[in-house]
Image (cartoon, helix red, strand yellow):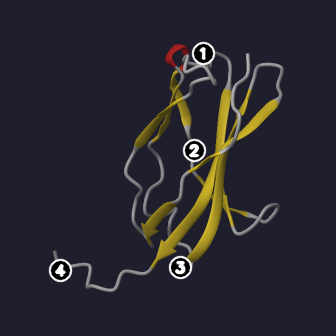
């Protein structure tokens, strides 16, 4: 089974000290069939560059392994309390052997400072 042909790109932009809204991904193979993630692990990190320190561990979890569902629910405002700027993130999977596979998704992770007073709606 071939899991991917290329890396999907997904850029994320967030205001500093602001939580990222929870989201889910469904893993599918190149034929569009759901990938069973039973006994797999998932990792996603934000860094300034490859090999630099981890600035944000996005803590993804496999919430429905049989249906290939990965959830990102734990990126709170405290985690995005880093300097404004452009960083990079990616997501890899690890199978039961354990062998890391991927990068499956990668992109820029932009953090900006709010301009308008946060008390103003």
Report how far apart the C-alphas of labels 4 and 1 lie in the structure: 45 Å
Report how far apart the C-alphas of labels 3 and 4 lie in the structure: 21 Å
Tell me which label, 1 or 2, sits earlier in the chain.
1
Characterize the local packing of mark 3: few (<14), some (14-19) or many (20 or more) Cα atoms within 10 angstroms: some
Q: Name the residue under label 2.
A: 59
**Relative to residue 36, is residue 69 drawn left or right?**
left
The residue at 44%/56% (across/down) is 76
Q: Up-down: is 67 above or below 60?
A: above
Q: Name the residue under label 4.
A: 120
Report how far apart the C-alphas of labels 3 and 1 lie in the structure: 37 Å
Image coordinates for residue 80, horizontal then vertical, percent: 50, 66
Report how far apart the C-alphas of labels 3 and 2 lie in the structure: 21 Å
Tell me which label, 4 or 1, sits earlier in the chain.
1
Q: Are marks 1 and 2 in contact (CB under 8 Å)?
A: no
Q: What element carries label 1?
A: loop
Image coordinates for residue 88, horizontal then vertical, percent: 65, 62
Tell me which label, 2 or 4, sits earlier in the chain.
2
Q: Up-down: is 41 above or below 34?
A: below
* Mark 3 vs mark 1: in front: 1
Tell me which label, 3 or 1, sits earlier in the chain.
1
Q: What element carries label 3?
A: loop
Tell me which label, 3 or 4, sits earlier in the chain.
3
Characterize the local packing of mark 2: few (<14), some (14-19) or many (20 or more) Cα atoms within 10 angstroms: some
Q: Quadrant of residue 23?
A: top left
Report how far apart the C-alphas of labels 2 and 4 lie in the structure: 31 Å
Q: Up-down: is 58 above or below 5?
A: below
Report the quarter where the C terminus lies.
bottom left
Q: Quadrant of residue 35?
A: top right
Q: Is mark 2 on a helix, strand or loop?
A: loop
Q: Name the residue under label 3.
A: 84
Q: Name the residue under label 1.
A: 36
């Amino acid at each position: 089974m071939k899991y991917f042909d290329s890396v999907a790109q997904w850029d994320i932009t967030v205001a500093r000290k602001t939580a990222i809204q929870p989201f889910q991904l469904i893993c599918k193979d190149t034929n569009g069939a759901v990938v069973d993630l039973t006994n797999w692990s998932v990792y996603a990190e934000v860094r300034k560059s490859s090999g630099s320190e981890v600035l944000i561990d996005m803590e993804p979890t496999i919430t429905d392994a049989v249906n290939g569902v990965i959830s990102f629910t734990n990126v709170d405002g405290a985690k995005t309390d880093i300097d404004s700027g452009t960083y990079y993130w990616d997501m890899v999977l690890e199978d039961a052997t354990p062998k890391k596979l991927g990068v499956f998704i990668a992109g820029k992770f932009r953090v900006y400072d709010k301009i308008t007073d946060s008390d103003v709606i």
